[in-house]
Image (cartoon, grey):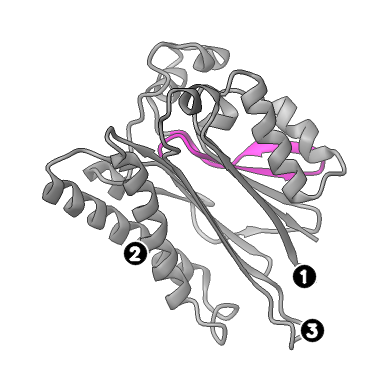
Amino acid sequence: MNPITLRYGVQTDVGIRRGFSGEPNEDAVFVFTLAAQSNAHSSDAALAIVADGVGGAAAGEVASRMAIETIAQHILIQLAPAERNELADQDVRARLATAITNANEKIIAWNKQQHIESASTLALALVLGTRAYIANLGDSRVYLYRGSALQQITHDHSLVAELIARGQLLPDEVYTHPQRNVILKALGDPSGFEFELYPAERGALALEADDQILLCSDGLWEMVRDEDIENVLRAPFDPQEACVKLVGMANAAGGADNCSVILLRAV
């Protein structure tokens, strides 16, 4: 398979309603890319993370930042340039699992020290050459746009997602259900050890030229429907323009929550 390179965009915003009330942006975002320019056969590596904090008195803001800092530090130290393209899929997945577990343990310990309850969702994409590894907790999402079609890779760990799976709720009702913000798994809680890695079985997602990986908090997908997201990714925007456009659309639709978007495009 031919090597690919990556372009990316990132945008985060407090949102209309929370900004108007003076609340902080409890979302945190992180993007790191690395290209081995000295080797024509080497592809880019990238780590992208979106974390949506939960908790009053700025505790959610701390939890999301702590999640990203812990995971990013662990992954970037573990993936030395000399070995990252040689690691077997199971080794990469194991290192991701360790990083997420460490972040969960750190937030749990901080909560105990502060005598508070805070948590954070997680949406993560790690790209090594043409291999992509995805992880999530809560209702922050990762999508794949391929061949003019948008597909949600991750599974929401939320009450409404469970109700839909049981046939007790229609998919479109996820946007209006009064308990749509109830998440069932998050970092900072024992449920944080129950994260999911994708592909669900094993291995990695094989990236193709023109693939786009979109990470977002619920502030995007609750306000902007999948078909509208798809239309933006289909348009000839560069990744940063696409991210700005998507966050703007979320705010134009009401901006009910913090909104964060990262877009990785394979070329």
Q: Earlier in the sequence, mark 3 or mark 2?
A: 3
In this view of the protein, which residue sits in the foreground, 76 or 206?
76
Is 27 displayed left or right of 7 in the figure?
left
Which image quadrant is residue 246 in?
Answer: top right
Q: Which residues are magenta?
A: 138-156
The answer to whether marks 3 and 1 mark residues whose Cβ atoms lie closer than 8 Å is no
- Quick one: label 1 or label 2, which is nearer the N terminus? 1
Rendering coords of residue 141 (x, y %) = 53, 39
Q: Amino acid at mark 3?
A: Ala
Label 2 sits on what residue type? Answer: Thr
Are discs 3 and 2 less than 8 Å apart at CB? no
Q: Position of residue 65 (x, y in %)?
A: 39, 52
Name the element at disc 3: loop
Q: CA distance from mark 3 to mark 1?
A: 14 Å
Of label 3 and label 1, which has the lower sequence position? 1
Q: Give the residue type that dot 1 points to.
A: Met
Give the residue pinned by disc 1. 1
Check if residue 113 falls in the magenta segment: no
Q: Residue at x 53, y 16 (%)?
A: 175
Q: Which residue is mark 3?
A: 40
Decide: few, some or many residues near mark 3? Use Cα within 10 Å; few <14, some 14-19, many ≥20: few
- The residues tagged by marks 3 and 2 sit, at their Cα atoms, a distance apart of 32 Å
Q: Is residue 145 left or right of residue 133?
A: right
- Establish if 40 lies above or below 144: below
- The residue where tag 2 is placed is 98
Q: Measured from the top left, where is residue 42 in percent x and y?
A: 72, 80
| Rendered residue at 83%/39% (across/down) | 234
